[in-house]
Image (cartoon, rainbow, N blue to C red):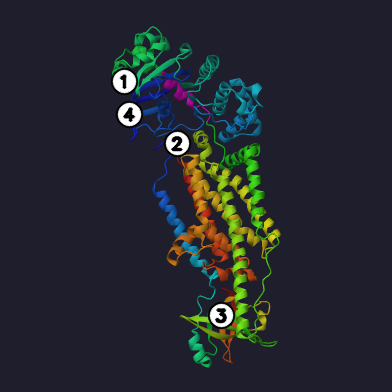
Amino acid sequence: MLSLNSVTLTVPSAEAPLLSDITLHLPGGHFGAIVGPSGCGKSTLLKAIAGILPHTGGSIHWQGRDLNEHDLAPHELGYVPQFTCAHPALTVGENIHYAARLRLADSKQNIQALVERVQAEVGLTDLHDRRASVLSGGQLRRLGLAMELTTNPNLLLADEVTSGLDPKSEEEIILLLAQLARHTGRLILLVTHSLRFLGEYDSVTVLTQGRLAYAAHPDMLASYFGVSSPEEVYPTLGQKEPDEWSAEWSASPNELGFEVESTLEDLTERMFSDQETEIIPLPGFWSQSTTWLTRRLKLFFRDRTQTCLQGLLLFAFPVVVTLFAYQGLPAVRNMSMGSDADVVQQLKETLAFTVQSSRTGTLVSGLAMFQVILLALMGSNNSAREVVGDRAVLEKEKLAGLRPGAALAGMTAFLFLLVLVQSAWMTLFVRAVCQFPGDLLAQWMPFALVTASMTTLCLAISSWATSGEQSSLGSLYLVGFQLPLSGAILALPEFLGWGVRPLISAYWAWSGYLQTLRDTRFYDLVRAITETPLAGGQISAWMLCLHLGVGLLAAYLGIRRSDWR
Amino acid sequence: MSRRAHQKTSPSAGVWLLGAFLVLGGLGAFFLQKDTNPYRTVEPLKPSDYLENANSLRGNVYRLEGMISGSLGWSQEKGRLFSLRVSQGDKDFPLPILVPSAFREINLQKGQRYRLKARVNEDGLLQIEDMTKA
């Protein structure tokens, strides 16, 4: 049984409360509609019940407990939002399968059996292998319902799931919901602006500008408002102030609404039946992470555009680097060590060496930094839209029990696979073509770390951004400032360098890479042309690991916070 | 207590994150600095003192940094003798450094910069005990 007692919801940005003094009692095994004109607070009420929007006054009780003190467990609540939570590239069966695996700790066989049962329940068995991208509107809504039914929730909230559907599809969904409510004892609330098929509901709740105007049987709706048909209710609502409607309803005879006594009986019955209610455990952290990872990999390989783009960057970028030294690094001519040459000869030799230092040193330093910047760009491309692109789906899945840390672990595992391939290929290809000397593993390490740190930092940006464009812009600026602030091209002023360099991943990767050439003449030539101090290999690796850690932590905080839009 | 679906992140989280980064970065720089300056605990050599009276410094160990400016000689037993240009203030001083045979694997070239740990030997020469590129 659901009880709302004088529930109010105010937000600082709105003058009037979004919900005001809503009192409602609804029993289990019940199918109720929440209706009203656009902007009256229907979806807001549903979100307040789900906890997505915090109510600022009054209380909400579910089966006798205050939800502010003891919230709905993931398996108790099903919430079907207006937007689709299904991944278009996955089939119907796969979408339900992954939804179940993220919410239930159970064996593969049991989950498979559950998927088949739920599909049958919503009438999607014949569409098991069809991709969500080709489903009709009504079929997509059924799929959304099916994903919520995997945990068999006692409370199912559906927000405008019939919007935009043709009358036949609308009727099918409503009949399905009515059947689910009556045959399984669930309380199902449907937000709709449509007043068709009222006879299928057990109750209708009418809102007007955040106030409760009516909450009772649908067959008394027209007579209560003094109209001949339900379609005339909305225009009639505009004839009085919302406060008047609310006051009228509060003063109306009890038989119109649900008796408190009847809800108390229901509560008593529920209290005893709750002892037998199965508490469904969530899957473990690593189970959820692994599910996220396997789903992400599947989505990646099915997205032709993404895979082609990644492939293009992977192979094109190293080729671009090697264009500047495709014949290998030039040999270094050393100055003579003896002092028996005349002064003019010595000066000529010094001049020639200076010119060589300038050319070869600039080339080596430039190639190192070019690789770093391109890897940073790849890292940014990896994750700039990873979170923000599917934020709504992520919030929905968190509501269903997905741990933010598990989602992050899955994302990180996927992204680090990309990092591994990108950094390894860049190191191997450029080293082979340009014939860079030095230890291979030591050269790969700074490249892997800078790609990983840029990936996690852009993942953090993505987790805090409010739109894809904002995230892409932020990531672009982050990469764009790496080169000028690294000091590889122009040395920063001393006072600025100490403050800025610790924050620039590219500087540490560039330094770390050049340290692997320390035993060669190339290192001397680079030192001759750069005024920026080169950091040691260990400190470079440490700082890059710190950047990576900061990115991961910031991404976790961004994913953990609620961001329903 | 906030509902499950409405989690907030404290505004101070960003400050804590930045603070942790600065502290850990600073600690890392402090403990790993020997990677860049391994002889930082050794006394630095003043070239002017050495050139004034090298014999009075016999047996002492110093650190110095400079550029190889030329080769002065070679002996199979004693090693290689180089000239190292070391700066003190705005002046450059050429100092003789003896690189023992134990360091024969290191190719020294004119123009290279090195950090050295050297002992003033019985002949008054700066004999290398350890060296690393600067």
Q: Is A414 rendered above or below residue A530?
A: above
| Quarter where residue A327 is shown | bottom right
> Given the current orientation, which residue lies at the most extreme top position?
A228
> Magenta stretch: dominant SS?
helix
| Element type at mark 4 | loop
- Along the line of sight, which residue is nearer the eye, A20 or B85? B85
Check if mark 3's residue and mark 2's residue have beta carbons within 8 Å. no
| Element type at mark 1 | helix
Would residue B18 appear left or right of A369 to someone viewing this image? Answer: left
Check if mark 2's residue and mark 1's residue have beta carbons within 8 Å. no
Q: Is A345 rendered above or below residue A35?
A: below
Mark on residue B4?
2
Please tell me how crowded label 3 is: few (under 14), some (14-19), or many (20+) other residues with Cα within 10 Å. many
| Residue on which disc 4 sits | A17
Q: Residue at x 49, y 36 (%)?
A: A395
**Label 3, label 1: how far apart the Cα atoms are:** 87 Å
Mark on residue B117?
3
Co-location on one chain, circles 3 and 2: yes
Q: Which residues are magenta?
A: A264-278
| Quarter where residue A20 is shown | top left
Mark on residue A83?
none
Q: Looking at the picture, how far across and down is residue A304, in whole percent?
A: 65, 38
Please tell me how crowded label 4 is: few (under 14), some (14-19), or many (20+) other residues with Cα within 10 Å. some
